[in-house]
Amino acid sequence: MKKKIIERLKELYPDVKTALFYRNPFELLIATILSAQTNDNQVNKVTITLFDKYPSPALLGALKPEELAEYIKTIGLYKNKSKNIIATCNLLVEKHNGQVPQNREDLMNLPGVGRKTANVVLSCAFNIPSIAVDTHVFRVSNRLGLVAGKDTLETEKQLMDVIPKESWSDAHHWLIWHGRLVCKARNPMCEECQLRGLCNFEQKKG
DNA sequence: AACTCGGGGCA
DNA sequence: TGCCCAGAGTT
């Protein structure tokens, strides 16, 4: 059953990729920190000029929090993000030779970087297989019965267990798009869902 | 486990 | 207008 769900998702969302605009690991890292709880389009609008002006950790980290905050004020949670991004940039310069680290532990020690952001960077920037679990990914895979329990590190292990390794990065996007378009948090469109019959959430919710 | 940050999108 | 959101840090 789970294998069949994965195969079907792959058919449904063949060409999905991240909507974030970035040209290197550093830009992806910053863009992903900015994207938390926020519309990607808004992030792209800001970063497309931000990265031209401040293309490196040293340059971006030299800003004062208020300066960066002013720059990104159209993005939600902008004060926290400004502070975290500058701290992260300074840490990259001081501890990582100005480079984005390529392992989970170092990434998660960067301010503003949690499980989801770390995995996005690992899989998208460095091709290190991992599954980034955000609210969409968890909700959809939970409803589909691919994972059980709360959203913890265990969720990632459960997903990695049922998804072929070569699809880990893609599966993140399949589940996100299915969550945004069909399997919505409220008023999920079960009647029109292409996975109807493979999923027992509709019965459970009734 | 609950609370906070937050502007923009959308009903 | 009110409600919600491609999370992470703090209490």
Image: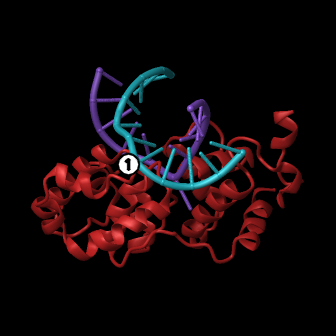
Chain colours: A red, B cyan, C purple
Task: Locate the C terminus of chain A and report the quarter of the image it occupies.
Answer: top right
Q: Residues within 10 Å of mark 1 (few under 14, many from 20)?
A: some
Q: Which chain contains the residue that carries disc 1?
A: A
Q: Residue at x 26, y 67 (%)?
A: A100
- Report whether A189 appears left or right of A33: right
Q: Residue at x 59, y 69 (%)?
A: A170
Residue A145 visible in this rendered orientation of the protein: yes
| Quadrant of res A203 | top right
Give the quadrant of the N terminus of chain A. Answer: bottom right
Q: Residue at x 25, y 53 (%)?
A: A70
Where disc 1 sits, the SS reads loop
The answer to which quarter of the image holds residue C9 is top left
- Residue at (77% x, 46% y) in the render: A188
Q: Is residue A126 left or right of residue A85?
A: right
In front here: A47 or A128?
A: A47
The image position of residue A197, as x and y in percent, is 89, 53
Which quadrant of the figure has residue A71? bottom left
Residue A124 in the image, given as x and y percentages of width and height: 44, 71
Residue A85 visible in rendering: no
Seen in the image, is B6 located left or right of residue B10? left
Q: Is residue A178 left or right of residue A115?
A: right
Place of residue A169 in the rendered image (x, y in percent of width and height, measured from the top left) = 54, 68
**Which amino acid lies under the numbered mark 1 shown in the image of this protein?**
Gly
Q: How many marks?
A: 1
**Residue A88 or residue A95, whichever sits in front:** A88
In the image shown, does A153 or A202 lie closer to the viewer?
A: A202
Q: Which residue is mark 1?
A: A114
Q: Nearer the viewer, residue A4 or A65?
A: A65
Residue A62: x, y in percent? 11, 61
